[in-house]
Amino acid sequence: MKFLIIGVGNIGFRHVEALLNLSDNNLEFYLYDKNISFKERFKELKINNRFKEINSLNGLSDLNFELTIISTTATDRAKILSNLNKFIKTKYIIIEKPITQSVYELQDLKKLKSDNIFVNFPRRYCNWHKKIKEKLNKDYISKNLRIEVSGSKIGLACNACHFVDLINFITHKQPYKVIIDDLEDWHKSKRDGFFEVEGNLKVNFEANISLLIKSYNKKKNLEINFYDLNDNQILLIDYVNGIAKFCDGKIIEGRIKYQSESTHLFFDLIKKNDQNLCKLDKAITLYKPLIDGLIDHWNKKFKRNDKKIMIT
């Protein structure tokens, strides 16, 4: 099987680590990254005879890739996908989040043939979260949920979409409004040239479901609390200790696998047409209220009228 990895930074490297767990002994990796040299790092995996460093995506039209992973920054994501669809034959595509930096790029993504494009939201294919979802839907389906995510420096511009997706995965409801009043000032992110924001971000979903993501600058372990509308706690997901504790005493233990442990599992589910996964068209619907809100907040803070923000 042939794999094309576009963007071979930390995440791209972890994807390759995981794919090496596949039982096929004839794996070939075509690795493209215009910004960094990654030869030395891949020697750690002792797969030098399995991967090919490529300097251009041109000239690959005669190859048939089983899977392409786009693990670049969010910059020009729509352009990359458009060119990929035109010039490269690939059966499946995985892209990282956030999917774009602007609403107009979302419109460009909508124009693409996207049945084979999946967004990497690991909680959807995590067995622990699947068990949590099953219990919630079995015993608490009639509840109008209020959900609070809290943690230390979550990075809302980059990572809020994970939790929006999780609530859609559990409830099958769509977000329609993002409230930005309690976000803090924007600051430079760890990656040069990009920006991040913390504070409180509220997302309203259909069926009177609300999500509040609270990102603290102080140390705070990541957890998610589920409440009914009478503020009775239904569930606590404690990520540090790996437990999901329901109000009836039921405890489900587990953890989210690292990317280096899970991409091959994601790939297997894609091939099985697992309906739990997030295809690009669904991701666009989930992401639009969020990117609208983030751009609105950016422009209010900086008194600008930008259509695109440098998030990744």
Image (cartoon, helix red, strand yellow):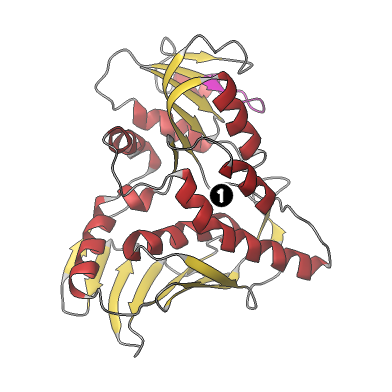
Q: Is residue 105 left or right of residue 96?
A: right
Tell me where the magenta segment starts and ends, as one range. Answer: 31-39
Q: Is residue 80 above or below residue 26?
A: below
Residue 7, quarter of the rendered image? top right
Measured from the top left, where is residue 277 in percent x and y?
A: 35, 46
Q: Residue at x 51, y 42 (%)?
A: 96
Measured from the top left, where is residue 69 in percent x and y?
A: 48, 31
Residue highlighted by disc 1: 98
Q: Residue at x 58, y 23 (%)?
A: 86
Q: Is residue 61 above or below residue 108?
A: above
Q: Is residue 298 left or right of residue 28?
A: right
Asked whether residue 4 is in view, the answer is yes
Per the image, is 194 magenta?
Answer: no
Q: Residue at x 27, y 79 (%)?
A: 234
Q: Is residue 43 left or right of residue 78?
A: left
Q: Is residue 6 left or right of residue 299?
A: left
Q: Residue at x 56, y 71 (%)?
A: 177
Measured from the top left, where is residue 186 in percent x and y?
A: 71, 64
Query: Dominant secondary structure of the magenta stretch?
Result: loop
Q: Amino acid at mark 1?
A: Pro
